[in-house]
Image (cartoon, rainbow, N blue to C red):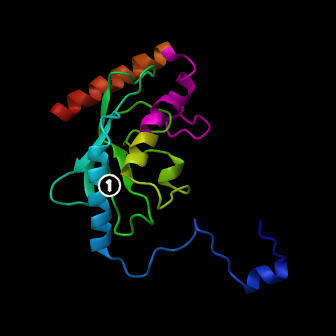
Amino acid sequence: MEVRNEENASATPAFSKQTRPAPASVDSAAVSQRLQKELMSLMMSGNLGVSAFPESENIFSWIGTIDGGKGTPYEGLSYKLSLRFPLEYPFKPPQVKFETSCFHPNVDQYGNICLDILQDMWSSAYDCRTVLLSIQSLLGEPNNDSPLNSYAATLWSNQEDYKRMVNKQYMEGVEQLER
């Protein structure tokens, strides 16, 4: 544990591992190589109910899929996500959004996700697989203390009505994607 007094605090700046800035010059080839390794690792890991692949020839833009976990209101449903990796990856988290409409306390109407590891708790040790598994876990274990969708957070306590809303919004979203 570090102990500093106020006089010394302003004289010597301290950087923790979490606040360390990204390198000044970005090596996109190194980032691309890391993403290639993550892709291979994800493909070799077997079916965990999560998958992701580059959207086209752009290694920085992926499409992911998450299956709802057993015993959750999302069981039997499959969600499409977009993942955008910044040039500063892995020092900055990817931007991840639900493309399939998802009724959830921590997902807003635009598919944005409130998940600590995609924000202030990001670590360069995380990879795409960790992100997808964390989102899959979030589906069954929402953080109702920090909702993006307050109606979903309120409804969570009534699982029967909640599951009905999950299925209704899912079906509406799938129909829109097919148009």
Whether residue 148 is visible to the viewer of this picture, yes or no, is: yes
Q: Which residues are magenta?
A: 135-159
Q: Secondary structure at mark 1?
A: helix
Residue at 43% over, 47% down: 130
Answer left or right for 38 relative to 18: left
Q: Quadrant of the C terminus?
A: top left
Res 58 → quadrant: bottom left
Whether residue 65 is visible to the viewer of this picture, yes or no, is: no
Residue 122 position in % (x across, y down): 51, 57
Q: Nearer the viewer, residue 44 or 60?
A: 44
Residue at 83% over, 77% down: 6
Q: Which kind of residue does numbered mark 1 sit on?
A: Glu
Residue 92 position in % (x across, y down): 44, 64
Q: Is residue 43 magenta?
A: no
Q: Nearer the viewer, residue 32 or 120?
A: 32
Numbered label tally: 1
